[in-house]
Image (cartoon, grey):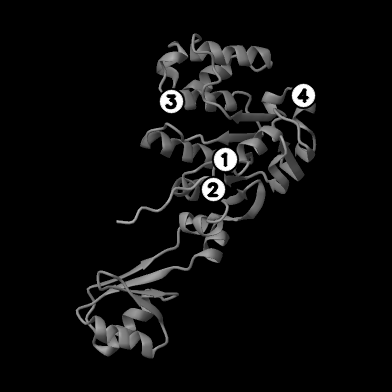
Amino acid sequence: MTSIDVRDLSKEYGGRRAVDRLTFSVRPGRVTGFLGPNGAGKSTTMRLVLGLDRPTSGTALIGGRAYAELREPLRRVGALLDAGAAHGSRSAQDHLRALAVSNRIPVGRVDTVLEETGLAPVARRRVKTYSLGMRQRLGIAAALLGEPEVVLLDEPANGLDPEGIVWIRTLLRRLAAQGRTVLVSSHLMNETAAFADHLVILGRGRLLADTPVQDFIHARVRPHVRIRTTEPGALGDLLARHGHDASREEDGAWTVRHGRVEDLGRLMAEAGVAVLELAAREATLEEAYLDLTAAEAEFTAQSQEV
């Protein structure tokens, strides 16, 4: 199958470097989450991959070729960059039929992708009557029309309701399971953790991480255990005697870093310390991402002190 290969890719706009010597690959058979703060260069990179802009230097190739060199590109690459790309006066069905005819795709595919994206009941309505979520579904339908080997989606869950978010998650996993190459940019960390196998993370146009999701989380954030007891002082002494890295929270509970529920529960039982709460808290992608990108965000709000 086909991979996306970005090599030493840079793009400058008026002296500002939006993409700075990027090198990474997006492999078939997995969903790659494309993350980074606003202004990190994600959308610019996707535009360069799709031949919508020219790089200042470096290359962005699909199956070893530039997008402009691909024959019948809609059969090779499906993309959603702008949910507003369809003409508002056309129906969804007519929009997709025009794409199919102009790209020598069987017109029967139109009904298939309308069903797949849940738009069949509203296929004859004008696009200007669609909600943002419906336009997103239409953009995804267009991306899937040619049954492409490579799929690039920019914020596909934008505007979708909870059912739609579950649907897009399932769709992405299915595309990867079919051996396709899937690159998805998103600001939704919990959703990215649910669908992505691999991460490519940018900051100020530079590559910050290129790693499997779980490896990234575990390398940057350690899980911890929360404990509440009727004897917080005795628990603190017990944890200190056994060398645990623990701190007292405002509500009186203790947080033990790098601890295991089984070990701590056994320790408290042997010491006769009563347990009100003993819960493991796993590290999240959001925590790991914020830890990595804290100094890379171009636009940040001041924290609000209460």
Residue 132: numbered disc:
3
In the image, taking residue 8 as reference, residue 263 lies left or right, namely left
Residue 46: numbered disc:
none
Q: Of helix, strand and loop, which one carries label 3?
A: helix
Tag 1 residue = 184
Distance from Cα at disc 4 to Cα at disc 2: 29 Å
User: Can you tell which quarter of the image residue 153 is in?
Assistant: top right
| Label 1 environment density (alpha carbons within 10 Å; few <14, some 14–19, many ≥20) | many
Q: Is residue 228 above or below residue 77?
A: below
Dot 4 amino acid type: Arg
Tag 2 residue = 196
Which of pointers 4 and 1 indicates the residue nearer the eye?
1
Q: Earlier in the sequence, mark 2 or mark 1?
A: 1
Which of pointers 2 and 1 indicates the residue nearer the eye?
1
At horizontal 37% and vertical 37% (from top left) the residue drawn is 162
Q: Percent from the top left, x then y, of residue 13?
A: 70, 35
Distance from Cα at disc 4 to Cα at disc 3: 32 Å
Tag 4 residue = 71
| Label 3 environment density (alpha carbons within 10 Å; few <14, some 14–19, many ≥20) | some
Q: Earlier in the sequence, mark 4 or mark 3?
A: 4
- Verify CB contact (< 8 Å) between mark 2 and mark 3: no
User: Can you tell which quarter of the image residue 208 is in?
Assistant: bottom right
| Label 4 environment density (alpha carbons within 10 Å; few <14, some 14–19, many ≥20) | few
Dot 2 amino acid type: Ala
Dot 3 amino acid type: Leu
Q: Is residue 1 visible?
A: no
Q: Earlier in the sequence, mark 4 or mark 1?
A: 4
At horizontal 35% and vertical 85% (from top left) the residue drawn is 239
- Verify CB contact (< 8 Å) between mark 2 and mark 1: yes
Q: Is residue 304 above or below residue 116?
A: below
| Label 2 environment density (alpha carbons within 10 Å; few <14, some 14–19, many ≥20) | many
Q: Earlier in the sequence, mark 2 or mark 3?
A: 3
